Amino acid sequence: MSYISLKLQERTAEGKKVIKLRKSGFVPSVVYGAKNPTTKTQSPYVETYKAVHAVGRHTPLNIVIDGKKKLAIIKDIDISPVKHLLRHVAFHIINQNDIITTEVPIILTGQGESPAERAGLVVLQAIEEIEIKAKPADLPESLEVSIAGLETDEDRITIADIKLPAGVEFADVDQDMELVIANVYEPGALQAANEAAGGDADEEAEV
């Protein structure tokens, strides 16, 4: 399996000097894990942004420091709340044979194709991500589950409907397989529920 690569340079800037580093077009970062000493690093903003956007927090990537390639996974991403710029990244070094635990997004497929939707009902996703574990080479970018078979407002999609790829397990050994991923609603009932929730919020705000 091929991974995206990102070249990092060792960083000396700390404290207030990190602000100047960011202004010069670099993203400060840190690399740790796999019994390696923690290393302060930096990399050009554009390349870093592209790599982070591509792999997120669930796909391994190769980081290259002083010509040495190491497999890593992103453990933390700091985004500025105002300008939404990448401010800091934490990379955790892993091994090919490590079992990695991470969250991956759940993607609903077949939207607009179900009898329920064609009948005017609404399908809403209740869970966006789920924690899984696997070796780096087996980690999927996402888990897909089809809603094309939904027919009535009594139907639902649960964790049991997810077909895990080979080598992948749910992180929780006691995972509730009946946990609902998506529900079907009648538009009128959904609107009434939203209005009721809004009313409760208004009442709480007035207290």
Image: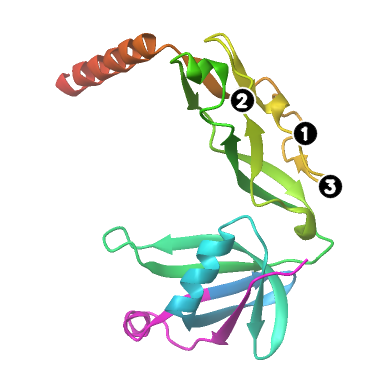
**178 inside magenta stretch:** no
Q: Secondary structure at mark 3?
A: loop
The mark nearer the N terminus, 1 or 3, is 3
Q: CA distance from mark 1 to mark 3?
A: 15 Å
Task: Report the magenta residues as a range.
Answer: 1-29
For residue 170, side relative to residue 141 (left or right): right
Whole-percent x, y for residue 179 in the image: 63, 23
Image quadrant assignment for residue 156 = top right
Q: CA distance from mark 2 to mark 1?
A: 29 Å
Q: Which residue is mark 3?
A: 167
Q: Amino acid at mark 3?
A: Gly
Whole-percent x, y for residue 91 in the image: 60, 68
Question: Mark 1 or mark 3, which is nearer to you?
Answer: 3
Q: Which residue is mark 2?
A: 148
The residue at 48%/62% (across/down) is 77
Q: In which quadrant will I find the C terminus? A: top left
The residue at 77%/33% (across/down) is 173
For residue 190, side relative to residue 130 (left or right): left
The residue at 56%/8% (across/down) is 154
**12 inside magenta stretch:** yes
Q: Which residue is mark 1?
A: 173
Question: Mark 2 or mark 1, which is nearer to you?
Answer: 2
Image quadrant assignment for residue 66 = bottom right
Q: How is the image coloured?
A: rainbow
User: Relative to 136, is 145 above or below?
Assistant: above
The mark nearer the N terminus, 2 or 1, is 2
Q: In which quadrant will I find the N terminus? A: bottom right
Q: Amino acid at mark 2?
A: Ala
User: Relative to 43, is 185 above or below?
Assistant: above
